[in-house]
Amino acid sequence: MRNARGIAAGVVAIAALLTTVVALQMDRERRFPQAEPAQQILYVNSPAVLTRLALSYDALVADLYWIRAIQYYGGTRLSEQGDKSYELLFPLLDLTTSLDPDFNIAYEFGAFFLSEKKPGGPGQSDLAIKLLEKGLVARPDRWQYPYDIGFVHYRDGNYNVAADWFERAAKTPGAMKQGERADMWLIPLAANTRATGGDTRSSRVIYEHLLTSEAAWLREDAARRLKKLDAIDRIAELERRTREYERRFGDPPPTWEHMVQAGLLPGVPLDPEGHPYVLNPWWGDVTVSRDSPVWPLPTENPA
Amino acid sequence: MRTIGLVALHVFRDSVRDKVLYSIVAFAVVLMAVSYLIGQLTAGEDLKIIKDLGLAAMSLMGLFIAVFIGIGLIAREIDRRSIYAVLAKPVRRHELLLGKYLGLVGTLLVNLSVMAIAYYVVLAYIGTTLSPAALKAAPAPPTDPRLLLAVLMIALELSLVTAVALFWSTFSSSALLSAGFTVALYVAGQFGADLKNFEQVVESPAAGMVGRVLYYVLPNFAAFDIKAEVVHALPLPAGYLAMTTLYAAVYIAALLIASVMIFARRDFK
């Protein structure tokens, strides 16, 4: 009995002391707030050194750096102030892929997000290509890496170079694998990119392919971009109709209702997110609403 | 042979009494907690990360057990002076040593086997949470039987580490020193490629030769690391696995013979 009472007293004492510790810590932090580190630091920069430090746990350390790269990218993108240069993104992905050269998604992530244009993204197409070329050295059989290099060039408007890489991707052994046959759509994509440059057909092929990606974030991003392409195609169609209105009545339509009354539209046109398209009554050109999630379109300046 | 078996059983029971098998519980808890957290922290590759983590955790926990219990197998008996009582019984020194070794290796194998079962259970669960697209894109199914090859290589590596730890503890009275030597040899054994190519970074041919000799003489622990190949479903020639298994067996035999020879001549006064 006495023993049980002693244990209970001990447990109560420990609980009380731990509660005091937590309270003390909270109070200290309230009185003396600690400054957040101004910027993130990469303690080990050298992939060669880190690979040795990881001993035989390099795949696990690669996973940790991959998680850190994701968190860094997301944190930087969502932060409303501070450094938005994404200067650690490439080193983090470089370390990840040095520790695990078969970490496919790290290369794909690099291609997609390093090459994203400023101000939304890092605008580091050169580093994206460097990362993918490293992947290509590790796995020359994978068609995805030359395809991703083509994608980066396509995004930068280098359509001929992009087409060259799409062709190269189609010729890699992996592209011709049974059940995959990526060459079947890579060859037309290359031809189309070379012939018509940045038209929406090529972009659509690229993003529709990304819809089948393993990573949910890539699929979501591709779906978002496909909606933008839908909006671009719809705008082209709407502008053809506003020109038809102008040809009939001498002036561009002042409102969508005028177009409906003229029988050129069945109703007010809505973008893929359900927002009405914006009509410029002076020139008859059409764009998306700034309230719509599809704004800005790739053809617009978000500034 | 019977004496060796009895000593081995005693070591196994001792390990159970020392709560060594608690590491299995720790492993299962860590793996389940991480499998939940991974989904929140990363973007894709959840399956790969959990596979990597499981194999690394098995290897790390086994390494701690092999080193810290391995060095104490003989040193503790000497320290407690219970070695006199043991050797006064009809137990020959080499039987004691081999029994101790097999007992710890048995503990490690039981540990690894149960961890592997827990690992497959967690992977099967993760498989049910993944989308069909993610499963299709994964290089191997969640419960890929080839993962057992990596577990087998971990078991061989740990058996070799145990033999190294036992070897040092036969002539060093200090457990700390034995642990230091074992860990140092384990780390050096991970730098096989650097030692082999040492001549490319030094000017002296003699230094290059020393590096090359060390590469062949020191246990090459890096050779047992096939975790990445298995997780990425890369080809693994059966010949490589067979030769690595044989390498471990021969190296362990050499270390055990050396340990028996040193232990037979050791004066406990």
Image (cartoon, rainbow, N blue to C red):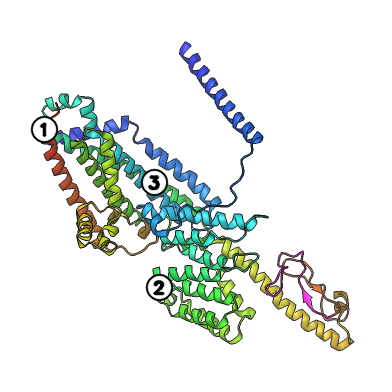
* Relative side of A232 to B197, left or right: right
Same chain assignment for discs 3 and 2: no
* Relative side of B81 to A243, left or right: left
Q: How crowded is mark 2: few (under 14 residues within 10 Å), some or many (20 or more)?
A: some
Residue at image point 76% right, 71% down: A288
**Relative image position of residue B124 (x, y in whole percent):** 44, 51
Same chain assignment for discs 2 and 1: no
Identified by mark 2, the residue type is Asp
Mark 2: which secondary structure?
Answer: loop
Q: Do the residues labelled 3 and 2 touch (CB within 8 Å)?
A: no
In the rendered view, tell whether residue B106 sits above or below residue B204. Answer: above
Identified by mark 3, the residue type is Ala
User: Which chain's residue wears label 3?
Assistant: B
Provide the residue span drawn in magenta: A283-303
Identified by mark 1, the residue type is Arg
**Relative image position of residue B132 (x, y in whole percent):** 51, 61
In the rendered view, tell whether residue B170 sits above or below residue B198. Answer: above
- Assess whether residue A125 is covered by the magenta stretch: no
The tag on residue A141 is 2
According to the picture, the residue beneath numbered tag 1 turns out to be: B92
According to the picture, the residue beneath numbered tag 3 turns out to be: B57
Residue at image point 57% right, 58% down: A73
Residue at image point 24% right, 30% down: B76
